[in-house]
Image: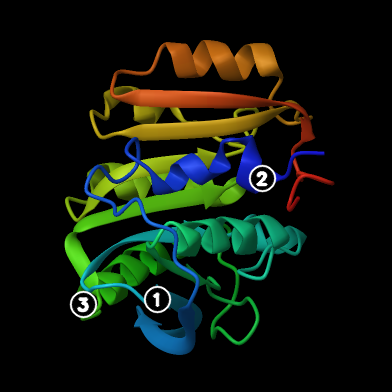
Amino acid sequence: MAGLRDSGLTRLCLDPILPNSVHRASQAMKATRVMFRSSGVRLEGVLTVPQARKPLPAVIVCHPHSAYGGSMDNSVVVEVCDALSRASLISFRFNSRGVGRSEGEFSQGAGEPEDVDAAISFVSAAEEVNSTAIGLAGYSAGAGSALPVGVKEARIKALAAISPPLSMFDFEFLRGSLKPKFLISGSRDSFTPISQFTRFCHDLPKPREYITVEGADHFWRGYETT
């Protein structure tokens, strides 16, 4: 059974997301656990840097709903970050407030956009990162809370949504964005019927690309790895 890395999800690493990315497989990488500040609280994250010539493009990957167990250690989030490393891109995943070792409490979506903005500032300042080539990706509710920030934030050059829950979040803001957009969802996603997903994506302004994966559900069970 094809995993996420073969399903098209690795297109997060390629031209639709970061046109200046380096198309070269990377075998070695360095993952560093960090703490960074977001409006008075400290958040934990993992910055993974491939062993390639710096600076490199980077993608920030946001985890699913923390009220339902979402964290930066979610298997889909980790697989996306691994795919980015294999394509010689820097990845940054982090726990929003109240998750894992991050301080604070879940704020029903009020403080999470601030955490995304803080993550963008942290990655932009990293010496290994090409600050002119940063993308923002979110899985499930992570797309719903992160991408509105990315649409408005000039430092974000491209957007990606993995299993965007169209029935739970309003993604209409994407209709006004001319940034490169990549969306992927499974044909058995219980939160977003495939017909709704394809219709929504088709109507988005270009540049945009979307992929559906036959048989995959919202949680990508059995599709995380090969």
Label 2 is placed on what type of residue?
Leu
- Which quarter of the image is occupied by the N terminus? top right
Mark 1: secondary structure: strand
Which one is in front, 195 or 149? 195
Which one is in front, 220 or 21? 21
- Crowd band around label 3 with a 10 angstrom C-alpha radius: few (<14), some (14–19), many (20+): few
Label annotation for residue 154: none
Q: Is residue 155 above or below residue 104?
A: above
The picture places residue 142, in percent across and down from the top left corner, at 55, 52
Label 3 is placed on what type of residue?
Ala
Q: Residue at x 65, y 68 (%)?
A: 71
Q: Which residue is mark 2?
A: 4
Residue 45, can we see it?
yes
Q: Residue at x 49, y 82 (%)?
A: 31
The picture places residue 49, in percent across and down from the top left corner, at 39, 76
Q: Earlier in the sequence, mark 1 or mark 3?
A: 1
Label 1 is placed on what type of residue?
Val
Q: How is the image coloured?
A: rainbow
Q: Which residue is mark 1?
A: 49
Residue 151 appears in which quarter of the rendering? top left
Q: Which residue is mark 3?
A: 125
The picture places residue 20, in percent across and down from the top left corner, at 22, 48
Q: Is residue 67 above or below residue 29?
A: above
Q: Are marks 1 and 3 in contact (CB under 8 Å)?
A: no
